[in-house]
Image: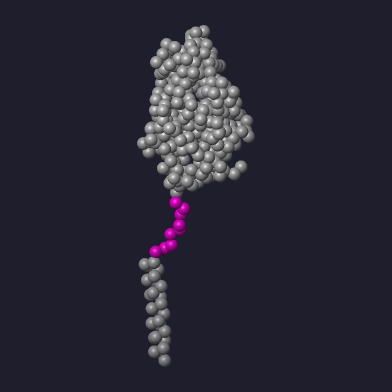
């Protein structure tokens, strides 16, 4: 009678032992987590400039996060410094002027603009009050000191072209790198430069205080065509072609985030846009900031696409004086791509 029970008891104990053993040694299931997005560092050639506003606005509107991107924005006072960071591999992208992609190709570097923010430069040549009577056009800059953000920057390219077009070679004036924003204003006030090229909101600040007057205005299409002979795509997001080949999904997400930002700029008022910007961008004079922003809205593209007549105009400007471009064959089709913005659905 006891033998069957004993056998049953042994069997039960064996099962319990097996369960306990499995419980002790089996690893608990670990929930699978999605891989964290790769960080994309973007250097902006002067992050408070209105020409580069889409960079910070996209961040403020949360469009990078909506795309699942981990984007870090950094700033350098001049586009040429941002370009150096890109080539060194310290950053993955640059928000700067499109013309850098042409000069870099001439140096054997393959870089492409994938989103065009502005179809005009948004740059303005401002003249100091003490020189206002003697400098009435770019033909009058002979013997003068002209301020640019940095030597080799887009402002230096454009300044040299405007002077050359007016008959003044680069040997007959001096370019002085003075940065942007307050440092540019200080250079004018201190008399270190007679005139210089800058953007909004610095332009409106100088006009309000009487610190300078406008000599050449490239904040709209008509003014740009009069100064440069055509549409001039400027502010853009450009990246090394090798990075784009390896990260097409990230590039597509960046394009979507920026195109949504450009569409926001064209469907909202300057007041609504300003409400999203950090307080340190706006400063103490919000009315001035909003006014300057209104003046800047026409510079932005609607869809991030490269204007068809833009690249030839930029190449013509650079070929006029830039030694690294003169006499070189430039394949403009390799300096930009609409591939990523074309895939963005309205």
> Split into 4 quadrants, where in the image is the N terminus?
bottom left
Q: Residue at x 43, y 22 (%)?
A: 321
Between 44 and 14, the residue placed more toward the observer is 44
Residue 276 in the image: x percent, y percent? 56, 33
Q: Position of residue 13 (x, y in %)?
A: 39, 78
Quadrant (top left/top right/bottom left/bottom right) for the C terminus:
top right
Q: Residue 250: in sight, yes or no? A: yes
In front of the other: 14 or 93: 93
**Residue at position x 55%, y 31% in the image:** 309
Magenta part, dominant SS: loop
Quarter of the image where one finds residue 183 = top left
Q: Is residue 337 magenta?
A: no
- The answer to whether residue 44 is seen in the rendering is no
Q: Which residues are magenta?
A: 27-35
Residue 164 x/y as whole percent: 46, 18
142, above or below 320, in the image:
above
Q: In the figure, residue 243 lies in which quadrant?
A: top left
Where does residue 91 sit, x and y in percent of width and height? 41, 37
101 displayed left or right of 295: left
In this view, the residue in front, 341 or 203, is 341
What residue is drawn where x is 44% and y is 51%? 35
């Amino acid at each position: 009678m006891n033998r069957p029970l004993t056998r049953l008891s042994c069997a039960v104990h064996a099962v319990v032992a097996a369960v306990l053993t499995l419980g002790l040694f089996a690893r608990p299931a670990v929930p699978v987590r999605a891989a964290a997005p790769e960080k994309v560092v973007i250097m902006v050639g002067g992050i408070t400039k209105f020409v580069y506003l889409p960079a910070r606005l996209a961040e403020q509107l949360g469009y990078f996060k909506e795309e699942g991107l981990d984007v870090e924005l950094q700033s350098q006072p001049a586009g040429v410094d941002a370009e150096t960071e890109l080539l060194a591999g310290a950053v993955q992208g640059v928000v700067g002027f499109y013309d850098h992609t042409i000069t870099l190709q001439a140096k054997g570097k393959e870089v492409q603009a994938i989103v065009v923010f502005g179809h005009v430069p948004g740059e303005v040549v401002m003249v100091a009050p003490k020189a206002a009577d003697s400098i009435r056009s770019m033909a009058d800059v002979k013997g003068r000191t002209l301020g640019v953000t940095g030597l080799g920057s887009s402002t230096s390219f454009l300044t040299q072209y405007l002077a050359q077009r007016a008959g003044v070679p680069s040997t007959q004036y001096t370019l002085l790198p003075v940065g942007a924003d307050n440092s540019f204003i200080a250079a004018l006030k201190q008399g270190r430069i007679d005139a210089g090229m800058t953007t909004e909101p610095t332009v409106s600040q100088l006009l309000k205080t009487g610190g300078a007057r406008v000599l050449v205005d490239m904040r709209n299409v008509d003014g740009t065509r009069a100064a440069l002979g055509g549409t001039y795509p400027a502010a853009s997001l450009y990246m090394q072609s090798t990075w784009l080949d390896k990260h097409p999904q990230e590039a597509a997400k960046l394009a979507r985030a920026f195109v949504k930002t450009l569409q926001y700029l064209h469907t909202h008022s300057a007041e609504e846009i300003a409400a999203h910007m950090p307080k340190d961008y706006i400063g103490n004079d919000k009315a001035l900031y909003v006014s300057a922003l209104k003046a800047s809205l026409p510079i932005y593209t609607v869809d991030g696409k490269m204007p068809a007549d833009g690249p030839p105009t930029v190449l013509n400007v650079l070929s006029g004086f830039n030694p690294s471009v003169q006499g070189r064959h430039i394949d403009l089709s390799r300096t930009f791509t609409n591939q990523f913005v074309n895939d963005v659905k309205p």
